[in-house]
Amino acid sequence: MIASVSAFLSDSPAAHVREHTSVLASAEKRALVWMAERLPRWVSSDHLTALGAASMVAASLAFVQARSTPWALASVPAFLALNWFGDSLDGTVARVRRRQRPRYGFYVDHVVDIANAVLLFTGMALSGLVSGWIAAALLVGYLLLCAESFLATHALGVFRLSFAGFGPTELRILLSIGALVAMVNPVVAPFGLREQLLFDVGGLIAAIGMFAVFLVSAARNTAALYRAEPLPQERQ
């Protein structure tokens, strides 16, 4: 087993191109580098990854607590900000200090991200602020995007962190705003229709968007690979 894993790693690319074109990407990158250069040396990338994971657990629990105490939602933006700090800064710290471990970092970071997503959407479903099927659709959409992105990273060598101007940071901001609004007004009546849960409306829009992005990205990457690998008899 160990030999097979070692063989796979020896054949795998050690690095990939990161493509991040979200609305806040440029400003975020400058801020992260500034913080990484000033972070105490005893704070490692692994510490930051752990902080990001713990913060997402706390955000999930805050959603669960909102079922009985709506004001618990006031803590969600703070926990998501801590999650951003840990999850976004861990890789930057490794690059600034020239202590990268590309495969280890890529694997651990995204395993934690997937676990965090399961926790977050479970917490939202248990909060009563969103229907169970909407929360499930959001999780499925997120996992589809993750799977497609990871496959594209291996096959094309490009890891995309954002789609249509939206990345993890923008999504955290939208979720924070939604939590604060739902704290005082969890129900809306869009376009004068009957009342719906705020997170059901937003979640449905987000789920449709994720499924659409998945289909577009899969089609685009399939076409790129088709062109890059023509059948032998078609080669000139």
Image: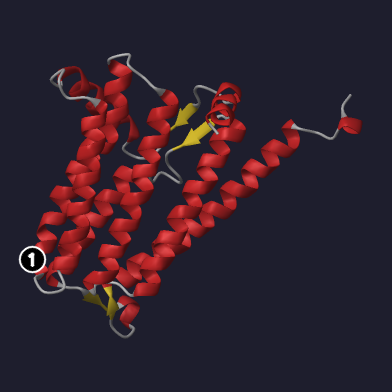
Q: Give the vertical position of 109 relative to 142 (above or below).
A: above
Residue under the image location 18 percent in, 44 percent down: 81
The residue sitting at the bottom extreme is 194
Residue under the image location 84 percent in, 35 percent down: 231
**Figure disc tally:** 1
Nearer the observer, 185 or 129 = 129
Residue 129: where, in percent of width, then height? 24, 72
Nearer the observer, 215 or 141 = 141
Is 91 situated left or right of 36 in this image?
right
Amino acid type, callout 1: Trp
Q: Can residue 63 be seen?
A: yes
Residue 40: where, in percent of width, then height? 13, 20
Q: Which residue is mark 1?
A: 71
Q: Give the vertical position of 215 relative to 227 (above or below).
A: below
Structure colour scheme: secondary structure
Residue under the image location 57 percent in, 34 percent down: 154
Residue 58: where, in percent of width, then height? 17, 53
Tag 1 secondary structure:
helix
The residue sitting at the top extreme is 98
User: In which image quadrant can residue 194 be found?
Assistant: bottom left
Q: 10 Å neighbourhood of mark 1: few (<14), some, or many (≥20)? A: some
Is 92 situated left or right of 236 in this image?
left
Q: Give the vertical position of 125 relative to 192 (above or below).
A: above
Is 124 situated left or right of 204 in this image?
left
User: In which image quadrant can residue 39 be found?
Assistant: top left
Q: Can residue 20 be seen?
A: no
Query: Split into 4 quadrants, where in the image is the C terminus?
Result: top right
Residue under the image location 81 percent in, 33 percent down: 230
Nearer the observer, 183 or 143 = 143
Q: Give the vertical position of 84 relative to 10 (above or below).
A: below
